[in-house]
Amino acid sequence: MGRQITKYFNEDELRCKCGCGEMKFSDKAVGKLDNLRFWLDRPIVINSGYRCPKHNDEVSSTGLDGPHTVVDDDNITVDIRISDEDAHGLLKVIDYEVFTGVGIKQNGPHSSRFIHLDCLDEGPRPNVWSY
């Protein structure tokens, strides 16, 4: 198990899932996720946190430089496995000034449902979208 980096999260939960071992989030960025977990008042399961550019290109249409690859002091990008009333609860406690990108996939099998959150401040893009 990876090193505990906040009250609620450890490195392994946020590192790239391809096996490269990279985890490039600042303490400030991870603190935003920790704060969200506090207000949700229930465990959060991270499907995907940081992705190295190669892995992101393999699993996402955003290619080598998608939101999961962005490294700066303010950004944390995660896909949270969540559905039904838990998803509704998460949407109620999100600080939309902190999490500027919210992608929602709540169709299909429960095991494939998630909510994407990021803190990017990039030009014109949707702030909320569905998959």
Image: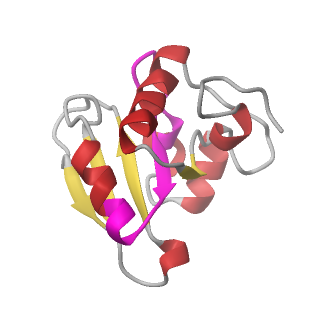
Whether residue 10 sits left or right of residue 116 in the image: it is right
Q: How many numbered badges does the structure rendering display?
A: 0
Residue 48 in percent (x, y) is at 57, 51
Residue at image point 57% right, 43% down:
49
Residue 81 in percent (x, y) is at 50, 60
Residue 87 in percent (x, y) is at 35, 61
- The quarter of the picture where the C terminus appears is bottom left
Please say whether residue 31 is visible from this viewpoint: yes
* Depth check, front residue: 38 or 72: 38
Asked which colour scheme the image uses, the reply is secondary structure
Residue 76 in percent (x, y) is at 45, 32
Residue at image point 33% right, 67% down:
85
Whether residue 21 sits left or right of residue 111 in the image: it is right
In the rendered image, the residue lying farthest to the front is: 41
Residue at image point 47% right, 22% down:
31
Please say whether residue 71 is visible from this viewpoint: no
In the rendered image, the residue lying farthest to the bottom is: 108
Q: Is residue 111 above or below residue 26?
A: below
Q: Is residue 92 above or below residue 122?
A: below
Asked which quadrant contains residue 61, the reply is bottom left
- The quarter of the picture where the N terminus appears is top right
Q: Is residue 29 above or below residue 63?
A: above
- Answer whether residue 92 is magenta in the image: no
* Depth check, front residue: 38 or 128: 38
Residue at image point 49% right, 78% down:
110
Which stretch appears magenta? 68-87
- Answer whether residue 69 is magenta in the image: yes
